[in-house]
Image (cartoon, rainbow, N blue to C red):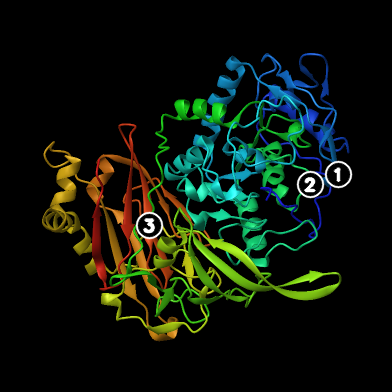
Amino acid sequence: TANHSKPQQTTANHSKPRSSTKPQSQNSEQKHKMAFFKKLLSSEKATSAVDDDEVLEGRWQEVHGFLGDAGWERPRVAARSEESNRADQGNHIKANEYMDSEHVLNEKAKRCAELLRKSEHAIAYTGAGLSRASGIADYATKAKDSVMKSTTVLKSPLDALPTYSHYVLTALHRNGLLHSYVQQNHDGLPQGAGFPQSRINEIHGAWYDVSNPVVQFSGSLRDDLFRWMLEIEQRADLCLCLGTSLSGMNADRCAETPARKALKGRGQGTIIVNLQRTRLDSVASLRVWGKLDDFFRLVVAHLGIEVSTAPYQLPAAACVGDTEDVFVVPYNDEGALDPRKRMRIDLRAGAPIRVPIECAMNFDAVGEILGKDARGNYKVALKETVKRGGRDHEIYVHRRFGRWWLAELINGDHPRCPLINVDPVVWDAPPPAEVSPTPVGSTASCASNTEDTSSRPTSESEEAEEHTDDDDDDEDLSVSSSSSMSSSGAESAGETPLYIVQAHQQLDAEVGHNQHLWSLRLNRKAATRVNAVTYHLHPTFPKPVIRRTAAPFDFQSRGWGTFVVRAEIELKDGGKVEAHHRLSFAENGHRVKTTPIAV
């Protein structure tokens, strides 16, 4: 099975990019670049770069990106082909391959690292080239002497392992430098490298999601995934466009829109990393010619972050008692996230299952669990309807259900459960004080957040109480979290301890069923050590990333479910630390829970 069964183009394609307007306050070089790109974008010709015997010719902006350097050495031909890279999609660019010199590749890696640091919402948009080094074949590689000829021989694409680049993307996400991921591939390798399933939009289908079969070229994208992709597209201010030929797929908007924004002075644009030319080279902010693994080793060195390529250990998914492969999740009998409910999922061999997601092309398909493969993924047989010879036929299709789904479903990280049992066992959740934390639901009805600078309304008496709040917090923390604080060394070194403080108030019934008003802040003495805090909420929130630069670094929100808030704390000494606070709705008050921050 190829990594990229031809995804569809049923939704309208982009019209050619419109001419951009001048951003304000530009120097002469920027004005020159903008004039160049205005003329370029008004032309129907995507690129004028041509080949000679050794190097890639054309405008330097097309070869290196408009944030590149005219003085950089041009990429050299590494492998030749007279074939088009994706003629099946109307892309007739020759499949020649090019490589930057070591010096230029390092310079581009340095600029990529700078753009990642500047970005507020960076995304990855990846194609089959990302997984080429794992041994999975792609469509675009045509040169007989391709530099990407893999020595890995797979009996099946399902045997592939993540590449170094997959692990780098996970490390970027964990360090707050990569926020969303639109994946054209189906292979599950990002998840195998530890990237959260809840942050990956597998827009063209997935091998490890039974509710998301691979989309053929003539098929239709799943409605919910398409809407989510549009949200990612609009939010992105930087796109890492990796290993995709950009042949005109609907999803190419994820690379095209950030590029257009940057030409208008908004955001960092699109970084294209590919051995072959693409139709968007002329609008890339940075154009990199080289192997992804080589490039990302340099990027990581400039960022100074660690990348672990050890086999990813999935979080333990709690089974029911000693019964293996039976789990309890906060979903209702239709597979929708509902913190008020608990549902048992039985994934033992022979258990009957059903696909409950209405917009899935195999909605309501039933089947059974066949067992597990060597890596612990569940093997599933589903009875689905397929069209052959103009008639519908029911056949059994073998699919996989990724092992990484279980921990995320137990935490309620997804609005819908991809599969449920045919006769699900569901019961009411315990009272709030006993409920295991589960995340918020959909943005439409379950979660909201605000830009209020105060964490909650306060009366005069409450303000008086707040003046002594730090002393009380420090005393509570030394008792309840002494083990965590001792590991940070803050108290022993005589430094001000840092911790997150949560307030909570359950709202009246007329405001909304099971609605909670809550806020987070740092202890007030933290102002002596902290410059800024970036809070990362559940991705279903309208604004999942909130940044505060003034003490007490607080914000207020509302919802009906609990989840883990990730906080990135920027210290005055230049350091950065991270903390994870799990919301609690067990009590009402201005300080219902504190989480120490290890420094």
Specify the amino acid type for callout 2: Gly
Q: Mark 1 vs mark 3: give the one in front.
A: 1
Residue 276 spot, x, y in % from top left: 73, 30
Instruction: Indicate left or right for 463 with 583 as reference.
Output: left
**Marked residue nearer the N-terminal end (2 or 3):** 2
Q: Are marks 1 and 3 in contact (CB under 8 Å)?
A: no
Q: Residue under circle 1? A: 90
Q: Secondary structure at mark 3?
A: strand
Residue 242 spot, x, y in % from top left: 63, 38
Q: Are marks 1 and 2 in contact (CB under 8 Å)?
A: yes
Question: Which of the labelled discs sits on residue 248, or is there none?
Answer: 2
In three-dimensional space, the C-alpha distance between marks 1 and 2, rounded to whole angstroms, equals 8 Å
Instruction: Determine the image quadrant of residue 500.
Output: bottom left
**Marked residue nearer the N-terminal end (1 or 3):** 1
- For the C terminus, give its image quadrant: top left
Specify the amino acid type for callout 3: Val
In three-dimensional space, the C-alpha distance between marks 2 and 3, rounded to whole angstroms, equals 37 Å
